[in-house]
Amino acid sequence: MERLKQLTEKLNRQTIEGVSKEALLEIGFEIIRELMQSEQPVQSEEQVQAPKALGPEIHTGTVQSLNDRFNPSVPDLSDRLQQLRQDTLRSAMGINDRYIFLETLFRGDAHSFDTMMGLLDHAKTVNDAELIAGQYIRKVQDNLEHAAVVEKFYELLRSRFSAI
């Protein structure tokens, strides 16, 4: 159990430090291996105690609901991994987003999309990145049909630079 505690602390520490996903996955695999090795053998029937008789009991205090137990306000590992700095903007977006951005913002012009993505990856601040993106997708920003896609792109851009 002590080894699991050490591995969990190591995983939390390295997540905060922003180490690579591969290193975090390796620690996760170590935790799984440790859990598999430390599994307790199934108890025989003689070792299992008879269950207590259930009767009308009055519980004092509060009963914790499932919603309270699984409170989303506490960040879990997946939230921490999503907040890690992405090396490139392209790696921060999924394949569906990439397709939507390419088709909507660039009308299928992959060369312009790749050029803009390269420039955005070299931008130092979010303001510089927004200026670069604004030059490439200026025509689409005025189209109300594509406003949601443009906003989604800028949110991705801001989240990429917020972790720096």
Image: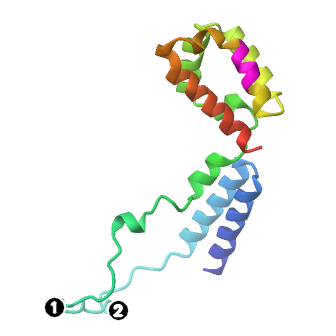
- Distance CA(mark 2)–CA(mark 1): 24 Å
The magenta segment is 130-135
Q: Is residue 146 above or below residue 54?
A: above
Q: Residue furthest left?
A: 56
Instruction: Say what amino acid the circle numbered 1 marks.
Output: Gly
Which residue is tagged 2? 47
Left or right position of 59 against 97: left
Residue 14 place in picture, x, y as percent? 74, 59
Q: What secondary structure is marked by label 2?
A: loop
Q: How many marks?
A: 2
Residue 142's x, y, as percent?
A: 56, 12
Badge 2 amino acid: Gln
Q: Main secondary structure of the magenta part?
A: helix
Q: Residue at x 67, y 31 (%)?
A: 157
Which class describes the residues within 10 Å of circle 1: few (<14), some (14-19), or many (20+)? few
Residue 15 vs 111, above or below: the answer is below
Q: Nearer the observer, disc 2 or disc 1?
A: 1
Look at mark 1 in the image and give the residue it sits on. 55
